[in-house]
Image (tube, helix red, strand yellow):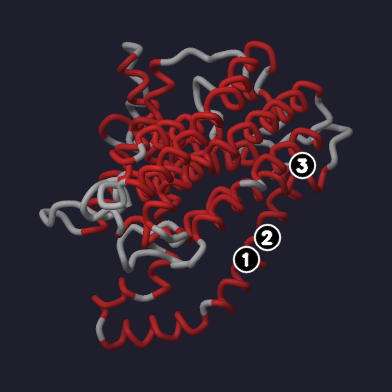
Amino acid sequence: MDDYSRPFFRAIAVTSLLVTATALYLLKGDIMNALEVLLTDPLAITATGLFRALVFPGLLFISVVPLMAEWVERKFVARVQVRVGPLYVGGPEGLLQPVADMFKLLFKEIIIPKNADRPIFLMAPVFAFVLGALPTIVIPYSPSMVIWNYGYGVLLFFAILAFFPLDVLLAAWSSNNKYSFIGGLRALYQQASYEIPIFLSALPAVMLAGSFRLADIAQAQSKVWFVFLAPVSAAVFFVSMLAEMERIPFDMPEADSELVSGWTTEYSGMAWGLYQFSIYVKMLAFAGIFVVFFLGGWTGPPVLPAVAWSLVKVSVVILVLLSTRAFWPRIRIDQLIRAGWGRLIPLAILNILLLVLFQHYLPGVVG
């Protein structure tokens, strides 16, 4: 390990120790309960809080799904563009290619620019992963499969994500690179422009369910999904998701044709890998919240368990999000900002007003 990489991995180690110690303190009751259940009825371990936090829908789940999503994206886009994609690593169709890439990044040199702000430069990727993973704690995959069934889960989800643009800007500024800084400013403009429409488009789901608790919103769609009652909100939310994640056609902050690689230009090795991983973790969080808001969460015919319905719906949404890379060209930054402020926000507000009128005059039909 080179001298430049040691501070980064020390930062990760210290952060991991602090997070682990905090988690052990907060989950000490769940740990004792899980040990008791494991000794008496091992199959019941899945109903414990510790299992939900560490396995599903917690740490293990949000670590495996992004790796699979990266492989699916590369294979899908390759097929659309008549290429092979990952093929030889890890059995059929290069299934373990993401794992091989992860190990490769672990041993690559992390180069820190001479005049960079070292503490911020090294800690920004760690915070990016944390900010991408934290919103998943309030997303329910069934009435019982949720880490924290918080009464104001909708507000907490968006409050956590609101810090992500600040982390991106800090990473860009700490790099001391003009291309990185321009990419960071683009990311800030872009995500600030689309945080308003994405929140406004989520309000109809809250209004229809009469609750800020995500489990209540999913349960309220047992008869009809909200995508049919508020299709405009679903469309605005989906487009805003793409912009928030900087996915094509909204990948202006990483525009390689004019910004090298945007705000990640100076990052290499596992520092760059953590940023890429955090983007896919954030995608999982957005797919989960879209399913809860508009696709009924775990609700569905009893041919599948509730958790299975959630996983199927989340997988479909992730596949659609990934497919945009294969079909759409990148738009200009002015088109993106104009679309956010001039079209999506008015659409979201108009949809809320129409929903209020329908709920007032047609209470038996809507809500």
Mark 3, residue position: 121
Q: Which residue is mark 1?
A: 19
Residue type at numbered disc 3: Phe
Cβ–Cβ under 8 Å for marks 2 and 1: yes
Could you tell me if the residues under marks 3 and 2 are in contact, i.e. CB atoms within 8 Å? no
Q: Spot the residue most to the left.
A: 303
Height in image: 44 above or below 154?
A: below
Look at label 1 and name its amino acid: Val
Residue 185: % across, % down: 74, 28
The numbered mark, 3 or 2, whose residue comes first in the sequence reads: 2
Tally the marks: 3
Indicate the amino acid at tag 2: Thr
Which is more toward the observer, 157 or 95? Answer: 157
Q: Nearer the viewer, residue 356 or 310?
A: 356
- Any mark on residue 15, and which? 2
Give the x, y percent position of residue 180. Answer: 74, 26
How many residues crowd mark 1 within 10 Å: few (<14), some (14–19), many (20+)? Answer: few
Asked if one can make out residue 353 in the rendered structure from this viewpoint, the answer is yes
- The residue sitting at 25% across, 83% down in the picture is 41
